[in-house]
Image (cartoon, rainbow, N blue to C red):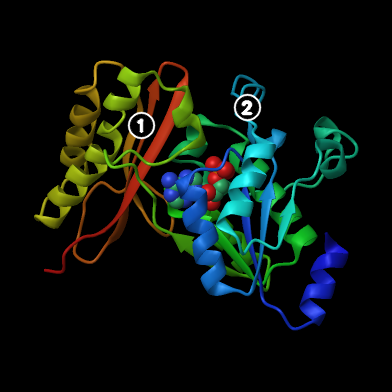
């Protein structure tokens, strides 16, 4: 992969990288489309990274559809390389003996990080390794995983990586449900009810745009919206600062915020968010 990237760079091409865990859907496709606009060479990686899953999470059952993924990529066209390392290629000493990790302690106290200890260390470390393998000029990531996106931007900044980050808005089904590889595990009823995630972040956005200044009031409305789905189990509904990811209590003029929710349907954990600016006084 490194030799291919070196050769492509020497030929004067611009390389964009789209990291994925496979089981490709419309969300991934929107990233690839954007990558094609940003660069003339596109690499897609497919790697279900063991180090970002907790011991009781769904690493073993995570959907893997490599042949179908390659067919989808061939169909889209314009993808020049698919990089799908084996686990032993990426963690030759085994994940338990991997020594060097990328961490970001201050920004991994809230949102998903609070509920998934070690998750973002796994993500930052594997993306660092994917950058090292694929040598992109541009990294294309989804804003659906907003905490991941902000942490990766911070990693690039703090470690002085010469990579431009591009964030792509969340691709959604007609119901508003964000595309996710995990959606395929929802029962028809759960899938119908899962539209409450997007509803919750929309009502939060509207409330803030209409001048609400209490974060508690906005969080309560998000919770109520989620709880209107009888099969849901709310994990969190938060309002955080979009730079620091710290929870915000009093919403004041000009703040850039994220309204975010995480919700279980059965064993399936779904997330959604919206970026929202508090109106100027
Ligand atoms: P994953 O395969 O779930 O690790 O996701 C790979 C990339 O696709 C990440 O940058 C995600 O943020 C992005 N992604 C996943 N779902 C969506 C979506 N519905 N819309 C836009 N990007 C997405």
Q: CA distance from mark 1 to mark 2?
A: 18 Å
Q: Closer to the N terminus: mark 1 or mark 2?
A: 2
What residue is rendered at 47% in x and 56% in y? 30
Label 1, ligand 1: CB separation under 8 Å: no
What residue is rendered at 23% in x and 23% in y? 227
Determine if residue 189 is in view: yes
What residue is rendered at 32% in x and 40% in y? 238
Label 2, ligand 1: CB separation under 8 Å: no
Decide: is 202 above or below 79: above
Instruction: Give percent across and percent down for residue 153.
Output: 55, 62
Residue underneath mark 2? 54
- Near-viewer residue (1 or 167): 1
Determine if residue 148 is in view: no
- Near-viewer residue (69 or 177): 69
Picture quarter with the N terminus: bottom right
Q: Is residue 259 left or right of residue 58?
A: left
Q: State yes or no: discs 1 and 2 in contact (Cβ < 8 Å).
A: no
Decide: is 271 above or below 19: above
Residue underneath mark 1? 236
Q: Is residue 219 left or right of residue 140?
A: left
SS assignment at label 1:
strand
Q: Residue furthest bottom?
A: 12
Query: Dot 1: few (<14), some (14–19), or many (≥20) neighbours within 10 Å?
Result: some
What residue is rendered at 58% in x and 53% in y? 75
Query: Dot 2: few (<14), some (14–19), or many (≥20) neighbours within 10 Å?
Result: some
Instruction: Give percent across and percent down for residue 279.
Output: 16, 64
Instruction: Give percent across and percent down for residue 8.
Output: 78, 74
Residue 268's tag is none
SS assignment at label 2:
loop
- Near-viewer residue (146 or 182): 182
């Amino acid at each position: 992969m490194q030799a291919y990237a070196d050769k492509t760079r020497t030929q004067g091409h611009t390389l964009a990288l789209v990291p994925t865990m496979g089981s490709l859907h419309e969300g991934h496709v929107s990233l690839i489309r954007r990558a094609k606009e940003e660069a003339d060479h596109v690499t897609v990686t497919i790697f279900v990274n063991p180090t970002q899953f907790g011991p009781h999470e769904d690493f073993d059952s995570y959907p893997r559809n490599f042949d179908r993924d390659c067919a989808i990529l061939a169909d889209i066209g314009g993808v020049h390389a698919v990089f799908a390392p084996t686990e032993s290629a990426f963690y030759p000493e085994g994940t338990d003996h991997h020594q060097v990790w990328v961490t970001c302690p201050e920004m991994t106290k809230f949102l998903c990080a609070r509920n998934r200890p070690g998750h973002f260390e796994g993500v930052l470390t594997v993306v660092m390794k994917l950058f090292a393998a694929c040598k992109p000029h541009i990294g294309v990531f989804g804003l659906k995983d907003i905490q991941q996106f902000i942490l990766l931007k911070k990693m690039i900044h703090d470690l002085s990586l010469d990579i431009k980050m591009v964030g792509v808005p969340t691709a959604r089904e007609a119901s508003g449900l964000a595309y996710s590889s995990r959606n395929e595990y929802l029962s028809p009823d759960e899938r119908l009810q899962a539209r409450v995630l997007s509803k919750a972040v929309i009502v939060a956005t509207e409330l803030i745009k209409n001048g609400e200044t209490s974060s508690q009031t906005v969080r309560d409305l998000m919770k109520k919206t989620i709880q209107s789905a009888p099969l849901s189990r709310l994990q969190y509904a938060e309002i955080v600062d979009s730079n620091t990811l710290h929870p915000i209590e009093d919403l004041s003029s000009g703040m850039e915020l994220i309204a975010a929710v995480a919700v279980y349907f059965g064993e399936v954990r779904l997330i959604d968010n919206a970026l929202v600016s508090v109106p100027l006084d």
